[in-house]
Amino acid sequence: MALLTYATKRVGQTLPVALLVTILIFLLIKLLPGDPASAILGDRASDAAVRALHQQWGLDRPLWQQYATYMNNLATGNLGQSLRYRTPVVDLLPRRMGVTLFLVIYSMLLSVVIAVPLAVIAAANRDRWPDQLVRGLITLPLASPPFWIGILLLIVFALRLRWFPAAGYGEGFVGHLRYLFLPALTLSNAFTAVLTRNLRSSLIDVQQTTFVDFARAKGLTYRDVQVRHVLRAALLPIVTLIGVRLSYAIGGSVIIETVFALPGLGSWMVDSIMARDYMVVQTLTLTFAIGAMLINLATDLVYPLLDPRVRMG
Amino acid sequence: MRRLHMVLASTIALAFALAGSSPSPNVSGQQFKKVIRFGVNRGAENLDPVTQDANPDIWAFMQIYQQLVRVNIKGDGFDPDLAERWTTSADGKTWTFFLRRDARFSNGDPVKAGDVVWSLKRAHDVKGPWQWALEPVQEIAARDDSTVVITLKEPWAPFLADVSLFSNSVMSEKVFKDAKQDQISNKPVGSGPFMLVEWKKGEELVMKANPNYFEKGLPKTPELHLRYIPDDNARIIAVQSGEVDGIDYPPFSRVAELKRDSRLQMQLNPSTAVSHLSLNIREAPLNNVKVRQALAYATDRYAIVRAVCFGYCTPATTFLPMTTPYFNKTAKGYTRDLAKAQQLLTESGLKTPLNLKLLYRSGDAVQEPTAVALKAMWAKIGVNLELEPLDRAAATQRYRANQFQVNISGWTNDIPDPSQLGAYELGYTESQSYHSGYQTKEMDDLLARGLREINPEKRREIYYKIQEVALRDSPLIWLYYAPYTIAINKKMTGFVQMATGPWIFKNVTVGE
């Protein structure tokens, strides 16, 4: 019950933020010089044609009216039309969202799969060579820009070795797994590094607590203690970290999708900003903002479930 | 720790499993792929032939629509397309087109004269950038189901070229007569070699062979996918890895590398692309012709060709592309002459350093190095060039509002005739002479005569004169002629790109 109250309260708090986001993004894109009509019609368009499009799209009306229309449409579930493609945004959104969600979740899973063993090895061998090696290795991806890593992976694994495809995202679940492996790996790099470092120190902290001493004293084996008590307790702070990094990963997808030619939300966002496709930019920004808020909310809600020591205030 | 080893081992196993097997070796014999996959740097947005101005749209719907006549591959004449033959009356004012009877739209309906009349009338009436192409037309009528008669107000030299323009594509009257604009933009129905089956906007255009296309046995490959891959590097990797069979616009900086790639054929196709600078001559100091000439003399076109095109372009000598009829091969244009430039600048009476601003599109692989090179070149005669990089949409707005001094821009012909570029670049009505603001009686008269002179030799003289006057007045500074860059897999054969730009895929096969 307490959880429900807490959740309601949190959702209530996010709503005004979402509203603020809509106002902010609406004004920001209007502040940019350049307008969609001339961006779409090109250099050779006549002034009459540009004016006609402005009128058709309502861009000749005062800003507050445009915003009111936008909010009114939003309230009725109408996300507007892509000016550029003359297609409702809602028709284009699911497909693209699928690509980005798959990519982001895939990269998160890869991070966890890679980081947990590394961190456990490092923590178990604290300050000995395996630890040093892991700590050294993970500074590399942290210090390299993802687009560069992406291009290197493409050259090695797609061009030279031909193990993975170079562009697109494949058909079906297995196809996606295969096509998105390199992009997801690239996107996961920074998080893998952060996760390994954090998990390692978290493991070391937990190993030094009294309940671990107590468990050992009870006669539990080293492995049982590590897996059941240490790892479980150490994973808790990581949940928060995953929440925070998920938002980063959505941002990172903008670059990764460009490098790997993926038709996801990120590359669409860049394209739409360039074309001043107002409706798409507004919808995508709102989607990203709501996504980030939901992730934060989910993180807060999951935390007490995992750790009985945390109580809702 | 054993469990951890297992996690590691299974991760690696997963990675290998996903990696899959390498592509199967070549099968001997004539095995062709069912799909041509072509990576393009810009996606199509709208496939209405009449209203669209961007090449990605035009080149895509040119796979779907046919016109009455088409430009031949050499680009110096016209081949029959929907019209199998045509005649002109003695006074040059009545054109009669006889349609082939075996042409059908992809939905199976025959192409009739009524469709042609409806389409051309729409192209004539709907507001768009191509209305000039039917400007001299007085009447378009169907004599019977397979004869179209077009009456002109006066004899018009480039009329056949105008008819071949993509905006005069023949659409199905039945399908589009009462259609909303969205349907015309999104669901083209034509009689060309391919038909649109699926359009994933901003991602891919999926076309299939039109089963009713009149040329039997064509297109040779059943499907054509135009895949939008905006990032240059991603597009190149896609063709190198075999993910696509060909790509457009690899940048000049990568041409040498692609030429060395044994799996690829790097094409530098003759085009009608001219790169130039628009000078805003409405205001001082560029209203002074001596200043403009000085800038033209101070510009080292060879150096720009080396720096921007890595040597693959040709310095421009007139406003016309080299491949256009009546291009004056003997014109020398402006060759770099600093002393002359300096002298002209002194004669202009303006003090140096002279401050000028250059508007260009930031991050553009061609415009950015051009801007940097110009800054250095013009500094030598005391011009302080301030660079103003803006993103494309913002730059377009500034340019259209004439808020610029110098703007980097470029042109490609849409018809194999000099009249289109002449009207657009040197005649005020269409574009304020590329927004330079240039307008003189002398030029207007020459351009008008060029459109109406039927005798080719006299017409040549007129266009030679136009090229000369344009160079003298220099409302623009012409920099270089660029080829189209295309990289295709060597297994792909039959690909043709017209000098006006569109690709022809109907003869293409891709070996397995």
Image (tube, grey):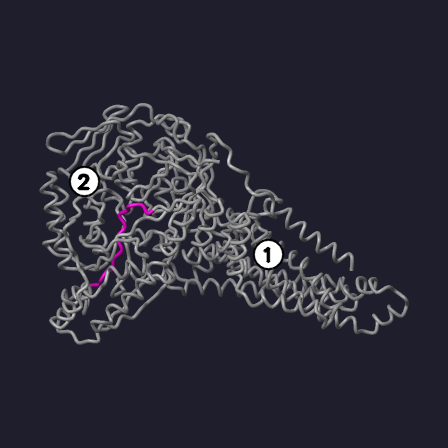
User: Which one is in front, A247 or B461?
Assistant: B461
Main secondary structure along the magenta-highlighted residues: strand
Tag 1 secondary structure = helix
Q: Residues within 10 Å of mark 2 (few under 14, many from 20)?
A: many
The residue that appears at 42% across and 38% down in the rendered structure is B492
Q: Amino acid at mark 1?
A: Leu
User: Which one is in front, A104 or B129?
Assistant: A104
The image shows residue B95, relative to residue A267, as above or below, that is above
On the image, the x and y values in percent for residue B376 come to 27, 69
On the image, the x and y values in percent for residue B315 come to 23, 55
Q: Which residues are magenta?
A: B268-281
Find disc 1 in the rendering and name its residue: A185
In the displayed structure, does residue B493 sit left or right of residue B423? Answer: right
Chain to which mark 2 belongs:
B
User: Which one is in front, A284 or A221?
Assistant: A221
Q: Quadrant of the N terminus of chain B?
A: bottom right
Find disc 2 in the rendering and name its residue: B158
Q: Residues within 10 Å of mark 1 (few under 14, many from 20)?
A: many
Residue A234 magenta-drawn? no
In the displayed structure, does residue B173 sit left or right of residue A136? Answer: left
Front of the two marks 2 and 1: 1
On the image, the x and y values in percent for residue B252 come to 35, 54
Measured Cα–Cα span from mark 2 to mark 1: 57 Å
Q: Amino acid at mark 2?
A: Pro
Chain to which mark 1 belongs:
A
On the image, the x and y values in percent for residue B305 come to 28, 58
Quadrant of residue A309 within the rendered picture: bottom right
